[in-house]
Image: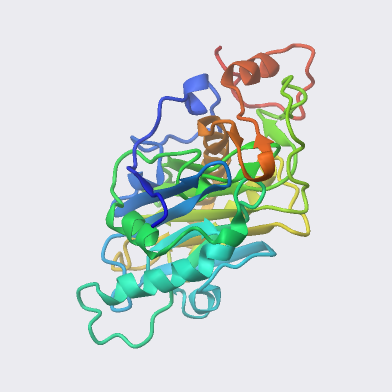
Amino acid sequence: MEPMAHVQSAQGTLPRARDLGIVVGRGGTGPLNAITDVPGVRVGHTTVRRPPDVHSGVTAVVPDAVGPQSPLPAGVFTGNGYGKLIGTTQVTELGTLETPVLLTSTLSAFRVADALVGWMLERPGCGEVQSLNPVVGECNDGFLSDIRARPVHEEHVRAALDGAVGGPVAEGCVGAGTGTGALGFKAGIGTASRTPELGGRRFTAGVLVQANFGGTLRVLGRCVTPRSLGLTGDPAPVTETGSCMIVVATDAPVDARQLTRVARRAVFALARTGAAYSHGSGDYAIAFGTRPEAGAPVADAELGPLFEAVLDAVEEAVLNSLLAATTTTGFGGRTLPALPADRLLDALTDPAATPLSGGRKQPSG
């Protein structure tokens, strides 16, 4: 059996964006600033490493009690469709989510989907189920991992699902983010949350990203590259490769059509971080609501704060995915450098650097 390390959902010791004074937007966060701030949402990771060639894994976003007999309202948006988001058409057609959302490596997505089906058929109430729509997203981790080995197996999927918990969420080089990189740096899993007010009531929106896309990193309106920070190493993957999977959860009373609008904003938010949306990038968001019994959905005219919350949370989640990651040398001896917090702060406070735009809080040092 391949070596398997199951990573519990706990944040590490590396600073997150807010720890550095990098504050995105005006809205408040949930207590953990994570997708698990949304009641009833759990996250599990299984990290699969076989150095130096394999750096991969699977991440599970698990809403409580989701299943074919208790589907949740959901929407999907495709920014650039060069990817393998399994289960998209039924979510689009019916506006419902029947399973947890799993993220993994491109060539392992189909094996993960099969394992998810097997796990779901064993759930209470699924004894007579004959049709099931697994939802599995992916990113290509082939720059750092031997993607053709398809190292993610059924036991890894089950470990992530069975180990999914609430509370703090591990970020960076864990689970489906173990071998991914974005914007020239090592990246991985990132998460964030916001608490927008809709119709006079406070709700929570949480996001989780699997960051693996090309472009030039922008932080507080300034361009940041490995070269500008004085880092050396192998050239990053060209911008024609890579993707980003975004999962959005909310307890706001919104229907599937509105959740599709939410998912659209989640993909739009990648532009704030410098995404190139290149030909070979698969940029997707799936958004689901956790309260299907909440009654009439909020009026469309009142969705503005939720849209803004998701835009801000995705931007911050991408930054967290970068800051939590560590320099990784993988398949073929290729290396992706981590984004060093100290050099990033120096670059952001350098008066010689010209910001692309203003209006955001500067780091406090």
Question: Where residue 62 sits in the image (x, y, percent)?
Answer: 34, 58
Q: Is residue 98 visible?
A: no
Does 213 sit left or right of 308 as displayed? right
Does 100 sit left or right of 306 as displayed? left
Does 284 sit left or right of 235 as displayed? left
Classify 117 as above or below 313.
below
Classify 240 as above or below 133.
above
Which quadrant of the figure contains the C terminus? Answer: top right
Seen at 77% across and 25% down, the residue is 227
Q: Can residue 341 be seen in this view?
A: yes
The picture quadrant where one finds residue 342 is top right
The residue nearer to you, when weighing 319 against 86, is 86
Question: Where residue 261 sits in the image (x, y, percent)?
Answer: 56, 62
Type of colouring: rainbow
Q: How many marks?
A: 0
The residue nearer to you, when weighing 214 against 232, is 232
Q: Which residue lies furthest to the front in this view?
A: 1
Seen at 65% across and 35% down, the residue is 336
The picture quadrant where one finds residue 138 is bottom right
Seen at 52% across and 28% down, the residue is 17
Which quadrant of the figure contains the N terminus? Answer: bottom left
Classify 292 as above or below 353.
below
Question: Where residue 26 sits in the image (x, y, percent)?
Answer: 52, 33
Question: Where residue 193 sits in the image (x, y, percent)?
Answer: 43, 42
